[in-house]
Amino acid sequence: MKVEIWSDVACPWCYIGKRRFEAALDQFAHRDQVEVIWRSYQLDPSAPRDSDQKMTEILAQKYGVSVQQAQAMNKRVEDQATEVGLEYHLDKIHHSNTFDAHRLIHLAASHNVQDAAKERLLRAYFTEGAAVGDTETLVRLATEVGIDAEEARSMLAGSAYEDDVDADIERARMFGIQGVPFFAFDEKYGVSGAQPTEVFTQVLTQAWTESHPLISVGAANADAGYCEGDNCVIPQAD
């Protein structure tokens, strides 16, 4: 089974949703047969590579509220993160453009460390206040998940994986995705938002059952012992 997850490095609910989905996947009997693919999405394509503007100020301007109200909004999100074992420091965030971070995630996929890269970038942004639009920061984070520094630097200096990021974003438009996180199960079931773990568990089970139907390989007969309701058939002796 394939699960595709559209997500942005700068999305607080995406990190929370990642943890809730992982909790469901850890409990799923067929987890080793589930392929998870991270897809690119940008909430703010016009964001600068790095900005000194505080997140509380950005939220206050965006929603037309006071700085104090924006701080309270951040606190509620931080509390939600704590419930799933994450440590958010939203006051430290460096508002950054995430396009290059998504390119790095695609590079990581070619090295089979995509999930590790996604996790490292999210932690860097929300917990450490790293500027994930900065090239050298991205190179450092790449090396921490096993990617050669010069390979990462060379990729970021060029245009590699730009088309892949754009293709992910375009595919999201085709699916009608208007916000993240968004989870697509075998291109059949979609889950929008950082839903409770129980929702992911239910969809994993349903998607698996429908894609792996139980096939009967033989009808019960007089030579095969079986029970139906309160009646049990006893095979006849030879």
Image (cartoon, helix red, strand yellow):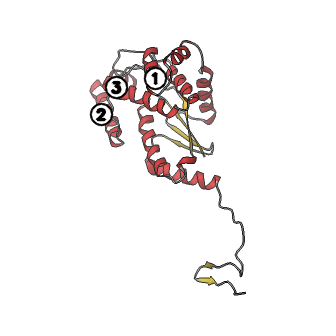
Residue at the image point whose x is 46% and y is 52% from the top: 27
| Contact? badges 1 and 2 (CB < 8 Å) | no
Q: Residue at x 57, y 54 (%)?
A: 206
In this rendering, the answer to whether 191 lies above or below 66 is below
In x, y percent, where is residue 218? Answer: 72, 70
Mark 1 neighbour density, 10 Å: few (under 14) some (14–19) many (20 or more): some
At 45% across and 35% down in the image, what residue appears? 14
The residue labelled by disc 2 is: 75
Give the residue number, with chain letter if any, for mark 3. Answer: 128
Q: Check contact, mark 3 vs mark 1: CB within 8 A.
A: no
Between residue 154 and residue 164, name the one nearer to us.
154
Pointer 1 or 2: first along the chain: 2
- Measured along the vertical axis of the image, is residue 15 above or below residue 26? above
Of labels 3 and 1, the one closer to you: 1
Q: Secondary structure at mark 1?
A: helix
Query: Mark 2 or mark 3: which comes first in sequence?
Result: 2
Amino acid bearing label 1: Thr
Residue 5 in picture, x, y percent from top left: 54, 37
Image position of 60 (left or right of 101): left
Distance of label 1 from label 2 (alpha carbons): 32 Å
Could you tell me the amino acid type at mark 2?
Lys
Question: Image quadrant of residue 86?
Answer: top left
> Can you identify the residue that label 1 sits on?
143
The residue at the point 52 percent across, 31 percent down is 114
How many other residues sit within 10 Å of disc 2, few (<14), some (14-19) or many (≥20)? some
Q: What is the distance, in whole Å, between disc 3 and disc 1 at their CAs?
A: 17 Å
Q: CA distance from mark 2 to mark 3?
A: 17 Å
Location of residue 37 in the rendering, given as x and y in whole percent from the top left corner? 56, 36
State the mark number for residue 104: none
Nearest to N terminus: mark 3 or mark 1: 3
